[in-house]
Structure formats: structure tokens, C-alpha cells
Image (spheres, grey):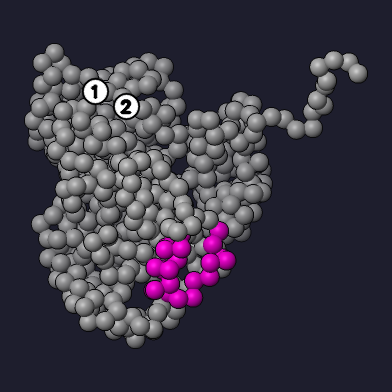
Amino acid sequence: MQGRVKENGSFDVIVIGCGIVGATIARELSRYTLKAAVLEKASDIPFGASRANSSMIHGGFDDSPGSAKAKFCPKGNRMYHALHEELDFKLRKFGSYVCAKGESEERHLKKLYEQGKANGAVGMEIVSGQKLREKEPNTAPDITAALWCESGAIVNNFEATLAFIDNARQNGVSLYMETAVDGLLFDESRSSVRGVSTDRGNFYAPVIINASGVYADVISRMAGDDSFIIHPTRGEYFIFDRAVGGLVTSFLFSCPSKLGKGITVAHTADDNLLIGPTSVQQTDRDNRDTTSEGLDDTLDGARRLVPGIPRNMAITTFSGVRANINTGDFYIKALDRPRGFINVAGIKSPGFTSAPAIAQHVTELIMENLGDVVKFEKDPTFVPERKHIPRFVDLGMEERQRLASSDPKWGQIVCRCESVTEAQVVEAIRRGARTVAAVKLWVRPGTGRCQGGFCSPRVVEILSRELGVSPLEITRHGGKSHMLISRTKEPLLPEKPL
């Protein structure tokens, strides 16, 4: 993973943004003998909405038939059920329920069911509240019916995003971190794009894909296209200790409203309990604050579904900013002028689910519209499989002993909450982690009950050693977020002799 641009590059395709959409597009492009690059302004992957979301793989019943969301969501769902094995990221086939209270909401369930059938969603059934509680006994007694969707699943969203870009890099895609796009480059008549300017120099390519999330309209305006507006929308979440992860065994939705799918309650891919999000529109594209009011609303909404959620078992809170778009649907378009510029914008829920299908569509869009500019030939050396760093916590004792015998670092526990070893941290660094947060996203130290209270110093120490830098240079998530400010236990000498 390249964190510094030493030479300006020339490529066939440049992807702006390495959230789930940019990562899946990169992986799809890596099937071909193209020279592709992904530019990401953050220090960690994933960083934006792909980092802070509900991790749900939706069944495909929420969206109006004929919409782009309805087209890509069910297909993306089917793709994930195959891709998680090919790319080795966690996916749990828990299924989902949309819960109704009373006749009005029950009518809405029927509408969702009919939409799902039209969209090609599978495994749907409307069940009574009593049948719901037979499987989910902790759900509210006033839930009268629920739409069950067997194909609903939940992923580890960190692992999934990393898996796609990791495999893309294995197949030749270049990734440039901490590289913010600040302009586009054109030919003399401004009829075609020629590349991008960044805070680290110029990159050249005849095809530019704008997958920049909440900044998609900003980047689009650089190309002269102001046909859509992104309204950043913040949502707040709680994560609870695994001790209460079993309060539910699936993914629970309230009936959706004009604000979205509402507060959800979910058993996560790593057996925690997740609740959220709220929906607060804001002008600031980077404000990821949590508030006492927002967290109260999150908990109140979740308790409408599962009354017994104990606040004192929360281990962390967070928020994410979604790219709500004024068109109401995904905006995927190759511009006629400047030629070579493609918008992939407004990819909010079910955007994570839809991403692999969107990536295929965008690749086909380039072939159809820009085949004279970029030549697509299947790469015979493409390797579709990719392995995640072994998850020590999930291994049997025999396999643990084998790994520890091969490398003593496998026997050194760094994070006790998640049973993360030194060898896992070292491998995360080898694959590109450069910050404490990046190591956390790769192999989970700091995600447990103590939230890094014990393991963070060890992660800093290992990063310092492996990168060959002072511990004072190690950051939480890049920039000025340094973990340490000075050495301790060094004598402070007076300016003048006593």
C-alpha cells in the first residue's frame, strides 16, 4: 500500500475513493490487462460510510421496482454469498425481519413483500408477531407481524472492504493513500479528461471514476456536472459487549419511514450487538460526532424492537455520514463531456450490498462508452481467491500450536479481548496498515471490551518497530493524531544550574 507518491503515474483508469464501491470497482478492473489506480485521501481503509454502517447485506425488498437500487441490491446480495468464501471475509447468514406494529404497518409489510418479489428478492415470508417471538423471544410484545427475509445477511464491513482492495492489489492495481484529489486535468478543448491533480502531484488517465462518497458532488462539479447534490446525513450507533450479543440472532428493522430504514438491532458478524442509526442531515461532510441526544434516540428506537437492551453493556459508540442524494436513487452515469468521466454517486443504503453488482455495471459502462480509449482484455494471470490474515481467535488448539511453532509471534497475545497475536499485527502492517486504527480494522485489536486500553501501547510498539520509526511518529488515524507526545521518566533539567 503506497502512502507517498514519489512519481506521478500514468494509468488507464483512476478510481477516486476506496470505500466499498471504489474497492469493488478496483477488483473488477483487475480482471483485465489494465493499469488501474485507486486514490484515497484517508490514512485507513475503510474510512467513510463503508467504515461506519450497519454491515447489512439486504435482501432487496426495500426499493421501488425499476430503480437502480432495486436492480443492483438483489444481485449484490447473491454475489456476496459467493464472494465471502472466495475473498475470505466474514458473512453470517442470519436473515432479517422488518417488524410491524398494528394494521397500518402490516399493510406496509405487504407492500415490501410485493416489491421484493418484483425485484427478485428470495426467501421472503410475512409471519405473525408470535412466530417472530418464537425465534426472537426478546422482541417487543406489541410487534404484530414481521417480514422475514432468509437471504438477509451481515458482514464484517472492515474485512469486506479490505478484501476487495487487497485482492485488487494482488492483481496489479495501485493504491495511493493520503492522496486527496483537488482538481481534474483535461485536454485543450476540455472535451475529455486526462487525469487528476492531487495534493501529492498529478496522475494521468483517460478514464476517471468518481466514487468519492459524500464528496461525489464536489468532484463532479470539477467536471462541470452539477446535476445532483449530496446531503451528508449523520447516523449514530452503539456497539454492545458480546455478553448481550445473543439478545437477538438476526437483523431487525422497524417499518421504514421517510427518514430511511430507521433504528435497527442486529447480531453482528463478530457476535456483538449493534443498534442504530439515527438520521440527521448536516452541511459538514466530515462531522462524525456523537451526541447525548442522538444516542438517546438510538437507544429509544432500538428498545421499541428489543425492550431489554442494557445501556451499561455498551462498549463504544460511533457515527457515520451517509451520502444522501437529492435524486433519491443511485446516480451512475458516464458523462458525454468531458468524455472519460464517470459518476458513481449517492451510493447509500443498500449501497454496501449493491457494490459488487455496481462494479460489474461500471466496468460494462466503460467498455460500452470508452472502448476506443481503454482496451479490455481478460488477464490470464488474474487470481480471484484471496486469504485474510488467520483469525487466531477462531482457530482450534492444534492449528494455534502449529502456527506458534512456525513463528513465536503467533504465541504472543497483544489483545486479550479479541485474542489477537503479534503475528497478526505484523502481517497487517506488511499488507499496508500504517496507523493504530488501520491495524484495528485489519485484525481487531481495540474492538473488545476495553476498547484498546491494554493493547494500544503494544500496537504502537510493533508499528514503530516494523516501520522503523520513532513511537512518537505513530498516529491513531494519520495526520496529527499522534498517540504519544513525549517520552516519560526522562529527567527535566533546569535551564540554569541550581
Compared with 301, 360 (above or below) is: above
Asked if residue 162 lies left or right of residue 412, the reply is left
Q: Position of residue 379 (x, y in %)?
A: 24, 33
User: SS at mark 2?
Assistant: strand
Q: Nearer the viewer, residue 282 or 286?
A: 282
- Magenta stretch: residue 383 in it? no
Residue that appears at 38% across and 20% down: 200
Q: Are marks 1 and 2 in contact (CB under 8 Å)?
A: yes
Asked if residue 105 lies left or right of residue 411, the reply is left
Q: Which image quarter: residue 124? A: bottom left
- Judged from this view, the residue extending furthest toward the front is 293
**Disc assigned to residue 184:** 1
Q: Give the residues in magenta.
A: 295-315
Q: Nearer the viewer, residue 22 or 260?
A: 260
Residue that appears at 26% across and 66% down: 256
**Disc assigned to residue 144:** none
Asked if residue 106 lies left or right of residue 419, the reply is left
Amino acid type at mark 2? Val
Q: Quadrant of the C terminus?
A: top right
Residue that appears at 85% across and 15% down: 496
Q: Which image quarter: residue 56? A: bottom left
Compared with 347, 140 (above or below) is: below
Amino acid type at mark 1? Leu
User: SS at mark 1?
Assistant: strand
Q: Which image quarter: residue 303? A: bottom left
Task: For marks 1 and 2, give the CA distance.
Answer: 8 Å
Residue marked by disc 2: 181
Q: Is residue 402 visible?
A: no
Q: Is residue 476 visible?
A: yes
